[in-house]
Amino acid sequence: MQVIDPSIALEGTTPIEEERVRPVTRRTGADRAFRLTTFGAGTLTLVLMGVIGLFLLVRSWSAISAAGLSFFTTSAWQPDGGAFGIAAVLLGTFLIAFVALGFAVPLAAGGALFITDYAPSKIKTPLVWLVDLLAAVPSLIYGLWGRAYLQPKIIPISEWISTHLGFIPFLKAKPGAGFAASTFIAGVVVALMVLPICTAVMREVFSQAPAGEKEGALALGGTRWGVVRDVVLPFGRGGMVGASMLGLGRALGETIAVTLIISPTFDITRLTHPLETGGNSIASLIALRFSESSSFGISALMAAGLALFVITLLVNAVASLVVSRSRSGASTEI
Amino acid sequence: MTTIEHEVLDLNNPAPELPPSSSLTARGVSAWFGDHKVLERVNLDMPAGEVTALIGPSGCGKSTFLRILNRMHELVPSATLSGTIALDGDDIYRGDIPVTEMRRRIGMVFQKPNPFPAMTVSENVIAGLKLSGVKATKSDRRDLVESCLQRAGLWNEVKNRLGAAGGALSGGQQQRLCIARALAVKPSVLLMDEPCSALDPTSTRRIEETIAEIAHEVTIVIVTHNMQQAHRVSNTAAFFLAGEGEPGHIVESGDTETLFTNPADPRTLDYVNGRFG
Ligand SMILES: Nc1ncnc2c1ncn2[C@@H]1O[C@H](COP(=O)(O)OP(=O)(O)O)[C@@H](O)[C@H]1O
Ligand SMILES: [Mg+2]
């Protein structure tokens, strides 16, 4: 085959330069306005995050520089006495969140599966609506209800767990210890508060499980549970992890409900016995101490707030990464 | 006494390795989605151990009919039906046999290959055992994986990567994996809804060979848009047609050779010769 080089196609003449263009789509006015608005909104969010972080850093600087690394290892909170740190409150925060997730994640997974794969289509919409409604209840109401109504009902359960599962060290209560105002009770109430977000995200992921694979499982003689186990759950695994972490982000920052329920303690031994009276969290520490602190005390609280801000930001970032990386949408490719 | 015990034993241990294939009979089958009637009084005999091809233009109800045959139709919330389907003479809708057991006996291969992507090739083949709660020893399972992949014509291509993900195979291999998966629960009928429409010609040929090899041990009902394929693989054929705004019905059915060369209805002749549809 003869190859024609365009530069020598016309012998004796100078090589013709090709005219290269990149077609452009001209943007309409509405298009440009929309771009500008979304770009503006996106940027504003980022700037706001930066401003909040910076504000916390500046206001907490005197406390941070005074405490240094001991801020992470001290469990007491006496800024004006010179000893203060987030060891106890941070631990308490995570303990409450873990108790909350321990209840919320299985409940959310079960509820989401019921809605997507078991409920008759007639009651699906009311159920979704009902779960979403849980999110609309103010956390103050959860706190009041939890303290006045739920707590007396949970205390006997705490006692039962402590006597029957007491061979697990952290579940064993000291003789004479009370069971009210505990990490456990706060965790149960926070569980109800993170349930809607966890259920909503899991429901969304489960509902995207590929129909072809579900039919394939049914055609092999599978039951509904078989379909859930072999198709829906493997498909939704990443989404479940993401939903749990979104719930964690919420639980870590929950303030008023926790403040109303726990009796604050900075004693690590008491904190690590979640059934017993006494718990703590960064958010409730700030809420309780803010109005009665010296200016240095406020700086110390700002430092605790900065720690909470960074942690929740990280948890949420990881959560959204996991959700977007999960196999949602991808079914068998040909 | 002894005779009775003997009989019970016989019933519990039907000796043959492969269950004998079964016949399917449709009588007066109509189907609706909501108020929309899509099938009109379909009668069809699908003889045991033979290949029955369902042909006809798009939208005339072939898939709906096929899905009625293994009770997948009822998975659509608005779907209803009338008429009877009998497996070896037993009504599959009104009998005592649970729907999951019925679907196990009447397997299905779909238009789009749908292996379970999170499972390996071997796990895909035996997925049906797990789904229907059948216990099997490790060596039984290994034998089953090999024999089903052999019968589906896939063994030589995947024997060295049984641990690979099911989704990592090519489209044609995935479809044969789905056939192997369906065969593993020992169905007596296998329904196939345009199993080759998403595949290249070579894969299509491999699947046709597979159909020819398994046809003597399992009754096959296949929907296809490919006239040569219907002609090549089937013994019996049924031509479905739906008039404008009317439900689909069978124009004629019977011996494939007759239907293709000397049909009773001129519309059949036109369709098999590609003159409309
Ligand atoms: N899930 C469904 N819901 C409502 N209508 C459906 C559904 N599936 C199929 N139909 C309708 O039923 C008719 C027959 O469809 P189908 O059985 O898929 O035909 P074919 O397989 O012959 O192309 C069509 O009119 C189609 O629109
Ligand atoms: Mg179809």
Image: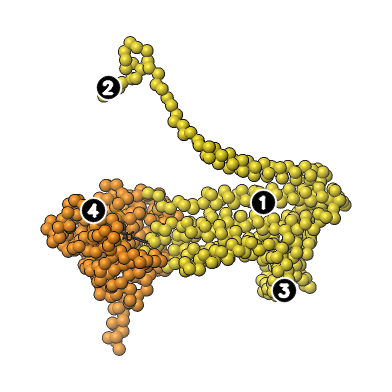
Chain colours: A yellow, B orange
Identify the residue at horizontal 68%, vertical 44% (top origin): A48
Give the alpha-carbon distance from disc 3 to disc 2, as whole Å.
Answer: 93 Å
The residue beneath circle 4 is B277
Label 2 residue SS: loop
Decide which of B58, A99 is in the foreground and name it.
Answer: B58
Q: Chain of mark 3?
A: A
Instruction: Choose the circle earlier in sequence order: 3 or 1.
Output: 3
Give the alpha-carbon distance from disc 4 to disc 3, as whole Å.
Answer: 73 Å
Looking at numbered disc 4 in the image, what kind of residue is underneath it? Gly
Looking at numbered disc 1 in the image, what kind of residue is underneath it? Thr
Expressed as whole percent of the image width and height from the top left, the position of residue B10 reads: 29, 78
Can residue A295 be seen in this snapshot?
A: yes
Give the alpha-carbon distance from disc 3 to disc 1, as whole Å.
Answer: 31 Å
Q: Chain of mark 2?
A: A
Q: Which mark is residue A312?
A: 1
Looking at numbered disc 2 in the image, what kind of residue is underneath it? Gln
Looking at numbered disc 3 in the image, what kind of residue is underneath it? Pro
Instruction: Give the label, 1 or 4, closer to the camera.
Output: 4
Question: Is the shortest distance between ligand 1 and the CB of mark 4 under 8 Å?
Answer: no
Instruction: Give the label, 4 or 3, closer to the camera.
Output: 4
Expressed as whole percent of the image width and height from the top left, the position of residue A270 reads: 76, 63
